[in-house]
Amino acid sequence: NRIVMAPMTRNMAPEGIPGPANAEYYRKRTEGGVGLILTEGTVIDRPGSRNMPNIPFIHGEAALAGWRGVVEEVHKAGGKIGPQIWHPGPTRGSVGWDPGVEVESPSGLVAPDDPRGKAMTEEDVADLVAAFASAAADSRRVGFDMAELHGAHGYLIDQFLWNGTNRRDDAWG
């Protein structure tokens, strides 16, 4: 069918590892008639990419094994599924949870003329691109049918697209 379940942050993956409860949740949505599920946001292998403590990872063998179980359950029920891959960038501090790493963004801003965290170096940006690419490749490897990159709401990708938050004068400006 053409019913798509939009991503909804659930914060239900202890230590970033999806488990049987996550698989059951997504399987039940498929059994209820959803044709394509976009998971809640999943975080890349980059410091500060998680904005709440139990957001699932889309990196590391334990998390990927957990996602493999989720994908298998959804496929058995006849559905398709893809992860939403994200890095919240400077919006991370807005929910009051602090993972103990510095906030990063293209120019050290959360909004025009509103500083938060540090401006990313060119090396940071290269690592960021590699982390997104790795997450997409790992998603395919564990059997996801597609992937969505979160590029809105002031999250890190979105920050690079706006003059007010991207004031870089290098190739990433």
Image (tube, grey):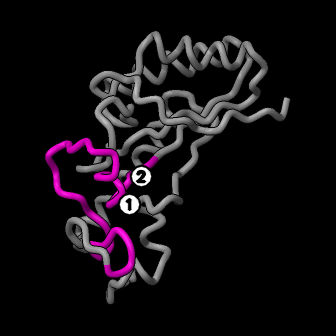
Q: Mark 2 falls on what kind of element?
A: helix
Q: Nearer the viewer, residue 145 or 162?
A: 162
Looking at this view, name the residue that lies furthest to the bottom: 169
The residue that appears at 32% across and 43% down in the rendered structure is 50
Q: Looking at the picture, which amino acid does disc 2 mark?
A: Phe
Q: Is residue 4 above or below residue 164?
A: above
From the viewer's perspective, tell me whether residue 168 is left or right of residue 38. Answer: left
Contact? badges 1 and 2 (CB < 8 Å): yes
Task: Please check the rendered image and state whether residue 104 is part of the magenta-colored stretch, yes or no.
Answer: yes
- Tally of numbered tags: 2
Which residues, given as a range, are shown in magenta? Answer: 86-113
Near mark 2 (Cα within 10 A), the count class, few <14, some 14-19 or many ≥20, is: many
Question: CA–CA distance between discs 1 and 2?
Answer: 5 Å
x, y percent for residue 161: 49, 74
Quadrant in which residue 81 is drawn: top right
Where is mark 1, residue-wise? 129
Classify the position of the C terminus by image quarter: bottom left
Task: Please check the rendered image and state whether residue 26 is part of the magenta-colored stretch, yes or no.
Answer: no
Q: Nearer the viewer, residue 53 or 124?
A: 53
From the viewer's perspective, tell me whether residue 163 is left or right of residue 110. Answer: right
Q: Is residue 102 above or below residue 13?
A: below
Near mark 1 (Cα within 10 A), the count class, few <14, some 14-19 or many ≥20, is: few
The residue that appears at 58% across and 38% down in the rendered structure is 7
Quadrant in which residue 99 is drawn: top left
Quadrant in which residue 110 is drawn: bottom left
Q: Mark 1 falls on what kind of element?
A: helix
Where is mark 2, residue-wise? 132
From the viewer's perspective, tell me whether residue 114 is left or right of residue 69. Answer: left
Q: Looking at the picture, which amino acid does disc 1 mark?
A: Val
